[in-house]
Image (cartoon, rainbow, N blue to C red):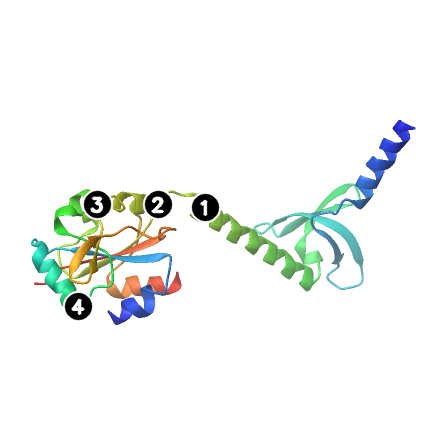
Amino acid sequence: MKSYEEIIAPKENVELIFMSLDRSEDSALKWAVKENFPWPLVLADKQKRSGLSKFASRGIPYYVLIDKEGKIIAKGKYACFEKIKEL
Amino acid sequence: MKKLNSSILALTCLLTAIPVHAREWTSADGSKKFPADFISYNNEAKTVTVMKGFKKVTFKTSMLSEADQTWLTEQASAKETSKEAKKSSSTPNIIGDQIDKGILSKLSGKHFKRYTLKEPMPEYYMLSFSASW
């Protein structure tokens, strides 16, 4: 959360999209309320339609940075944030 | 009389036309200066093309002063930045268009509400795959 607020939130050209893997919307909502998620998210039932599920990996949490054309720029939390700092 | 007026007008326009990159150039050793209009710079070959009077001349940038060489690299850099900016803004935002169709939600109080990306759409998206379990 701190990294998001310090690194991503101030940048207008970068958006964090949370890909919720909770099958139940209730579970996803409870967690979002508890942590006060400030970012937009894609619920599990819409992920296929979003076209973004292809970027998922086996393990979670998983972070990947892509450009607007869908090209992968960085993988992994540290690499993503370091790259975003440069943008 | 009409012919004379139009000739005078054409000559006036020619004389008062402001060249885009009129510049006084200095030789590397500082001993010579000459006015010429900048046409282009080849960063790979390190050559510059100028219009000296009515003659187009190309020569190595090493023949120019350090200040002139710096100016040339700044021109090249400014051109690249402008090219990148144009490229960036003109390419479609495929991801943005894909997900901005009622797919995104955002927490609003204690509920999820439909969310639309702000304009202009972001250039980059950090996807965070996770779950509450």
Task: State the separation of the CA atoms marked 2 and 4.
Answer: 30 Å
Task: State the separation of the CA atoms marked 3 and 4.
Answer: 24 Å
Q: Quadrant of the C terminus of chain B?
A: bottom left
* Front-most of residues B95 and A78: B95
Marks 1/2 in contact by CB < 8 Å: the verdict is no
Q: Chain of mark 3?
A: A
Q: Is residue A10 left or right of residue B108?
A: right
Task: State the separation of the CA atoms marked 3 and 1.
Answer: 25 Å
For label 3, the crowd category at 10 Å Cα-Cα, with few meaning under 14, some 14 to 19 and many 20 or more, is many
Task: State the separation of the CA atoms marked 2 and 3.
Answer: 14 Å
Identify which amino acid the numbered label 1 is placed on: Lys
Q: Which mark is residue A35?
A: 4
Rendering quarter of residue A33 = bottom left
Query: If you read the primary sequence from the N terminus, does the residue marked by circle 1 or circle 2 appear first?
Result: 1
Q: Which residue does the image show at 71% across and 57% down from the upper left?
A: B63
Q: Is residue A80 left or right of residue B80?
A: left
Q: Which residue does the image show at 58% across and 52% down from the upper left?
A: B43
Q: Quadrant of the N terminus of chain B?
A: top right
Q: Chain of mark 4?
A: A
| Identity of the residue furthest to the right in this view | B1
Picture coordinates of residue B44 (x, y %)? 56, 50
Mark 3 — residue? A50
Q: Kindly report which numbered mark, 1 or 2, lies closer to the viewer in this rendering.
A: 2
Q: Chain of mark 1?
A: B
* Front-most of residues A43 and B105: B105
Mark 2 — residue? B93
